[in-house]
Image (spheres, helix red, strand yellow):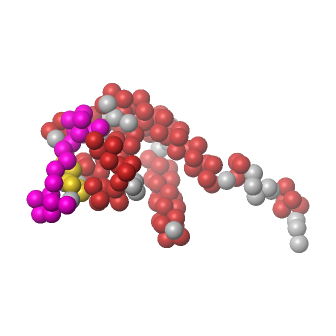
Amino acid sequence: MKTELDETIDPLALERQVCFALSVASRGVVSVYRPLLEPMGLTHPQYLVMLALWQQQPLSVKDLSQLLALDPGTLSPLVKRLEASGYLRRERSATDERNLEITLTDSGRRLREQALLIPAAVMARLQIELPELEQLHASLTRVIAAVKSAG
């Protein structure tokens, strides 16, 4: 039995699609980061690599790939450019020659000081307060987990 409301809601309306909202939001948020990262010589994907390494190092390429949810073929050029910029080093693991470990250089560690200003600048540009961003993060984390379990 259809109600009047059912007839007015198009389940395929673009503005109702989660995939559309996520796509537009993602592009928009990355564009907010761009002018903040440019002075540091980083792209957004490179910034994600640096965030992971500021949190924990050394990381194997495999572990970094899993942590960032990037395939090694996508990650490798990012790591090579960061190494060419002098922010990190790739070295064979002392315990297993088959593994490539990534560690920060002194320059990469110092870059973290500049990066500490980024979260507040992003919040200011988005004009969204921390509690709302934390709620959004929690929702997106649930979506990521659901996608992983469905995959």
Q: Nearer the viewer, residue 100 or 86?
A: 100
The answer to whether residue 97 is magenta is yes
Where does the image place residue 35, in percent across and percent down from the top left? 41, 29
Q: Is residue 110 visible?
A: no
Q: Quadrant of the N terminus?
A: bottom right
Name above or below for residue 144 compared with residue 116: below
Question: Which residue corresponds to the image point at 30% horizontal and 31% vertical from the top-left?
Answer: 40
Where does the image place residue 130, in percent across and percent down from the top left? 44, 47
Left or right relative to 49: residue 126:
right
Name above or below for residue 59 compared with residue 112: below
Q: Nearer the viewer, residue 27 or 136?
A: 27
Left or right relative to 139: residue 83:
left
Left or right relative to 111: residue 140:
right
Q: Residue furthest top?
A: 39
Question: Which residue corresponds to the image point at 39% horizontal and 55% vertical from the top-left?
Answer: 71
Name above or below for residue 104 compared with residue 3: above
Q: Residue furthest left?
A: 94
Q: Nearer the viewer, residue 130 or 76?
A: 76
Which region of the structure is painted magenta? 81-98
Q: Is residue 55 visible?
A: yes
Where does the image place residue 22, in percent across and percent down from the top left? 57, 49
Name above or below for residue 90 compared with residue 145: above
Quarter-wise, where is residue 42 in the image? top left
